[in-house]
Image (cartoon, rainbow, N blue to C red):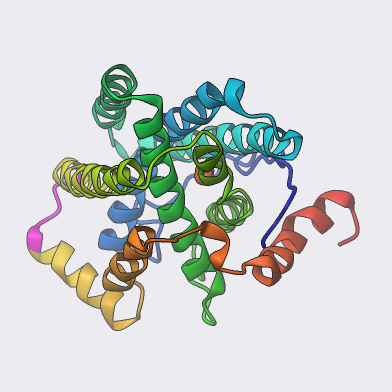
């Protein structure tokens, strides 16, 4: 078992509008563009996850699961807002995110229209597995993955990772409660994997092009990231595959100690005890 109840924290990371460096991720263009590209998926993607869970709620009777589904929706909408504020600061460097975000919006709407609720939930669960596994990996590292980046951005990412771990099983439990078959669950895992990887690659390419970055400069950034252990793509792929195990459940990873530790950074500070 993992977190049984949790809440959305209303956070504001960018009240201070001090500009961010263009390569805010430790001066590394590769890490910066990869992080920008994946986070561009969040605002519309998270809205899609919330819609999928909400559409299933009339079929849910467990009061605890209903409460968790509401907290899940509240957390996800806060995440979208925080990342949008981060994008606003990055726009000062001349990036145009609108085309990429519009593409995501259209893809999500297409999925809403053409896929069953069961399949939308299966896709959502696979995406939630991805975010939980990334959060566990990044928060659990001995050496702080977000070390050396702007304190506002570092806090935002740690908070987002924390809440992804807290609500990691909600969509999955909703999916199970409405009786989605294993076949649909696994198909959703495949669709999500290819859609997300395709988007990530395409968005990274668009941002690098807007930046006028040479392939050599990007490669150099990637080499540095790999040397410093900051590009754990292979590890992510291996962990993503866990979703395809026959009796997979997000709670098979016990994240309670990690959640408790990171939550102190936010809950204690907000309650004035630190
Ligand atoms: Fe999120
Ligand atoms: Fe999430």
Q: Residue furthest top?
A: 113
Rendered position, 84 above or below 169: above
Of 179 and 258, the residue lying toward us: 179
**Which x, y percent locates residue 219?**
14, 68
**Which x, y percent locates residue 122?**
39, 40
Rendered position, 102 above or below 243: above
Rendered position, 129 above or below 235: above
Does residue 219 appear left or right of residue 67 in this picture? left
The residue depicted at 34 percent of the width and 33 percent of the height is 119
Q: Is residue 14 visible?
A: yes
Q: Is residue 27 visible?
A: no
**Which x, y percent locates residue 68?**
68, 39
The residue depicted at 38 percent of the width and 58 percent of the height is 243
Q: Residue furthest left?
A: 215
- For the stretch drawn in magenta, the main secondary structure is loop
Quadrant the N terminus occupies: bottom right
Instruction: Write down the quadrant of residue 245 in the picture.
Output: bottom left
Of 177 and 77, the residue lying toward us: 177
**Which x, y percent locates residue 139?**
55, 68
Does residue 268 appear left or right of residue 96 in this picture? right
The residue depicted at 26 percent of the width and 72 percent of the height is 234
Instruction: Write down the quadrant of residue 3 in the picture.
Output: bottom right
Rendered position, 39 above or below 70: below
Which residues, given as a range, are shown in magenta?
211-215
């Amino acid at each position: 078992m993992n977190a049984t109840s949790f809440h959305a924290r209303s956070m504001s990371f960018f009240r201070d509008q001090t500009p961010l460096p263009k390569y805010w991720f430790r001066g590394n263009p590769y890490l910066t563009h990869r992080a920008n590209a994946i986070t561009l998926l969040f605002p519309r993607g998270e809205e899609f996850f919330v819609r999928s869970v909400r559409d299933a709620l009339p079929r849910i009777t467990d009061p605890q699961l209903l409460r968790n589904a509401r907290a899940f929706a509240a957390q996800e909408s806060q995440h979208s807002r925080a990342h949008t504020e981060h994008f606003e600061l990055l726009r000062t460097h001349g990036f145009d995110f609108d085309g990429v975000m519009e593409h995501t919006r259209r893809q999500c709407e297409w999925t809403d229209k053409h896929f069953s609720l069961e399949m939308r939930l299966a896709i959502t669960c696979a995406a939630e597995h991805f975010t939980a596994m990334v959060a566990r990996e990044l928060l659990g590292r001995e050496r702080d993955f977000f070390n050396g980046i702007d304190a506002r951005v570092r806090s935002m990412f740690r908070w987002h990772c924390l809440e992804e771990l807290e609500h990691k099983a909600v969509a999955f439990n909703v999916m199970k409660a409405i009786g989605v078959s294993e076949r649909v669950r696994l198909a959703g895992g495949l669709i999500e994997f290819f859609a997300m990887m395709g988007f990530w690659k395409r968005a990274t390419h668009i941002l690098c092009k807007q930046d006028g970055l040479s392939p050599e400069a990007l490669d150099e950034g990637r080499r540095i990231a790999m040397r410093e252990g900051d590009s754990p793509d292979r590890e992510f792929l291996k962990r993503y595959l866990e979703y395809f195990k026959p009796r997979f459940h997000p709670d098979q990873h016990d994240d309670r100690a990690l959640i408790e530790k990171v939550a102190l950074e936010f809950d204690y500070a907000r309650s004035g005890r630190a």
